[in-house]
């Protein structure tokens, strides 16, 4: 099978690429020619030209809402610490971490990766009678 080399499909366009696309378009090149020069699909070029104008382009707008306070790398560290300290409370985990995120922020990020709070089941301790019965059973079942 021949592999299509019409354009890259992966990440979003950055400011440099958009300004290059706008410049090529302003010079009078077609969408197909621009796509070939930039290495992106024709639809990506078309969308960029619909979204931005040559004269008013400043930069790509950031996504709406406040910026995430915990990066992906920090999130991997948090998940590792949580899995190592399974019985610790959320407050204890925030104290263990070096950057000390807010408890509610940590709770939200952990929920995103599927880690939620749960109550540990209280198991009764072994009484001396239980210990004696276990020892007798083990000695009987030894052979």
Image (tube, grey):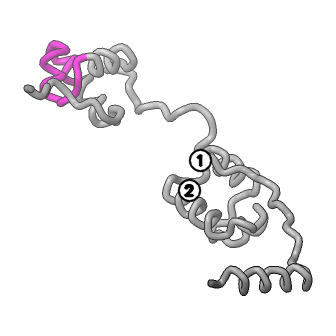
Furthest residue toward left: 2
**Towards the viewer: 130 or 11:** 130
Residues under numbered marks 1 and 2 in contact, where contact means CB atoms less than 8 Å apart: yes
Which residue is at the front of the view, 119 or 143? 143
Q: Quadrant of residue 38?
A: top left
Could you tell whether 78 is left or right of 24 in the image? right
Query: Quarter-wise, where is residue 57 in the image?
Result: top left
Q: Mark 1: which secondary structure?
A: loop
Q: Mark 1 highlights which residue?
A: 113
Residue for point 33% across, 21% down: 48
Choose the circle earlier in sequence order: 1 or 2: 2
Tell me what residue is drawn at x 78 percent, y 64 percent: 89
Expressed as whole percent of the image width and height from the top left, the position of residue 92 reads 76, 69
Q: Residues within 10 Å of mark 1 (few under 14, many from 20)?
A: few
Q: Residues within 10 Å of mark 2 (few under 14, many from 20)?
A: some
In the rendered view of the protein, which quadrant contains the N terminus?
A: top left
**Main SS class of the magenta portion in the image:** helix
**Label drawn at residue 75:** 2
- Drawn side of residue 130 relative to residue 47, left or right: right
- Highlighted magenta segment, given as a residue range: 23-42
Cα separation, mark 1 vs mark 2, equals 9 Å
The location of residue 35, given as percent across then percent down, is 18, 22
Which quarter of the rendering shows the C terminus?
bottom right
Report the front residue among 28 and 140. Answer: 140
Residue 42 coordinates in the image, percent (x, y): 22, 18
């Amino acid at each position: 099978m021949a592999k299509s080399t019409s354009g890259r499909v992966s990440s979003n366009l950055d400011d440099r690429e958009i300004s290059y696309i706008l410049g090529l378009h302003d010079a009078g090149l077609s969408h197909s020619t621009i796509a070939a020069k930039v290495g992106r699909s024709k639809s990506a070029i078309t969308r960029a030209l619909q979204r931005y104008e040559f004269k008013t382009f400043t930069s790509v707008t950031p996504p709406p809402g406040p910026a995430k306070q915990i990066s992906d790398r920090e999130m991997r560290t948090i998940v590792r610490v949580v899995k190592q300290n399974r019985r610790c409370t959320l407050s204890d985990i925030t104290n263990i971490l070096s950057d000390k995120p807010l408890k509610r922020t940590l709770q939200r990020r952990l929920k995103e990766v599927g880690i939620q709070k749960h109550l540990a089941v209280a198991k009764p301790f072994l009484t001396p009678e239980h210990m004696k019965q276990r020892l007798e059973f083990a000695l009987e079942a030894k052979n």
